[in-house]
Structure formats: structure tokens, C-alpha cells
Image (cartoon, rainbow, N blue to C red):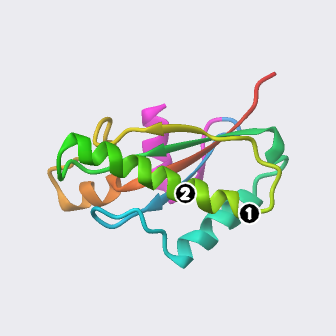
């Protein structure tokens, strides 16, 4: 799954993965869990573009870079997840409760030794997958 997410990120902030899995990434400034107005609109546009969203599972997977301590980054990851969930809850759609994975600085997809890598790791991925019955 990690490689699929990397592929999705390389293709853009919203991407179709294998089958019907879709990913949209929300990016943050260093040490921040603030979501700007443009990204709020992008979240809504992304979710409204999913057909039969009531039959989809949402996973919120948050990440940080490795600047700061592990405990701080775990907290920051949780706050980023909560910010995205708060925005999702404001959208009038029949959504299932999301699964939440707070990675903190663990499991980076990008190299934290570079500025570009740290910027790419400061994100929350909204992952949409069909619910398998």
C-alpha cells in the first residue's frame, strides 16, 4: 500500500489507485494543523466527486516530518487528523465514520533529509476505498 500511496502522490494530490481506491492529500506548514480555504474547498470537491460515497470507507492517515521530538510529532499528527475530520464533518454527505491512522514521524514516504521530502511528509491522506461485503 505504501508504494501505491507514493504513486498517487507522484501523480498529484488526488489520484485513482488500484481498483476504486482514491487518495487526496492535504498539506500543512511546519508545526501547523491549519487548513487554508483552498484546501477546504479541495476536500469538499474530492469527496463530492466520489460516486456512492456511502458505500466507501474513509481512512485518515496523518504524517509529519521528523523535525521536533517523536512525542510532539505524534500530537501534531493527531491534531492534523482532527482538523481534516472537522472539515469533512461540515460537508453534507452520507459518510461512514473514518478510520484514523496517526503516523507522526513514523513511516515517511519521502526523505526527511531534504526540504522537499519534509514538505511532502507534512500531510494528511484521505483514502477512500470500497467497503467489501
Q: Is residue 24 left or right of residue 110?
A: right
Q: Which residue is mark 1?
A: 91
Q: Is residue 110 above or below residue 118?
A: above
Q: Is residue 81 magenta?
A: no
Q: Is residue 90 above or below residue 78?
A: below
SS at badge 2: helix
Residue 126 percent coordinates (x, y): 57, 49
The first of marks 1 and 2 along the sequence is: 2
Residue sitting farthest toward the top: 133
Residue placed at 20% from the left, 61% from the top? Answer: 115
Residue at disc 1, secondary structure = loop
At which x and y percent is residue 6? 42, 44
Give how far across and how far down residue 94 sits, in percent.
Answer: 83, 50
Q: Report if residue 7 lies within the magenta region.
A: yes
**Residue 14 visible in this rendered orientation of the protein:** no
Q: Position of residue 111 (x, y in %)?
A: 22, 47
Q: Which residue is identified by label 2?
A: 84
Q: Using the rendered view, name the quadrant where residue 58 is placed.
A: top right
The segment highlighted magenta reads 1-18
Amino acid at each position: 500500500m505504501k508504494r501505491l500511496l507514493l504513486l498517487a502522490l507522484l501523480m498529484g494530490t488526488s489520484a485513482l489507485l488500484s481498483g476504486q481506491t482514491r487518495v487526496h492529500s492535504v498539506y500543512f506548514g511546519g508545526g501547523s494543523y491549519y487548513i487554508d480555504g483552498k484546501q477546504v474547498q479541495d476536500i469538499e470537491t474530492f469527496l463530492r466527486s466520489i460516486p456512492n460515497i456511502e458505500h466507501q470507507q474513509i481512512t485518515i492517515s496523518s504524517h509529519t516530518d521528523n523535525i521536533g521530538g517523536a512525542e510532539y510529532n505524534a500530537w501534531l499528527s493527531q491534531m492534523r487528523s482532527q482538523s481534516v475530520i472537522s472539515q469533512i464533518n461540515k460537508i453534507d454527505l452520507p459518510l461512514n465514520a473514518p478510520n484514523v491512522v496517526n503516523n507522526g514521524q513514523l513511516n515517511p514516504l519521502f526523505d526527511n533529509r531534504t526540504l522537499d521530502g519534509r514538505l511532502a511528509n507534512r500531510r494528511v491522506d484521505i483514502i477512500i476505498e470500497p467497503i467489501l461485503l
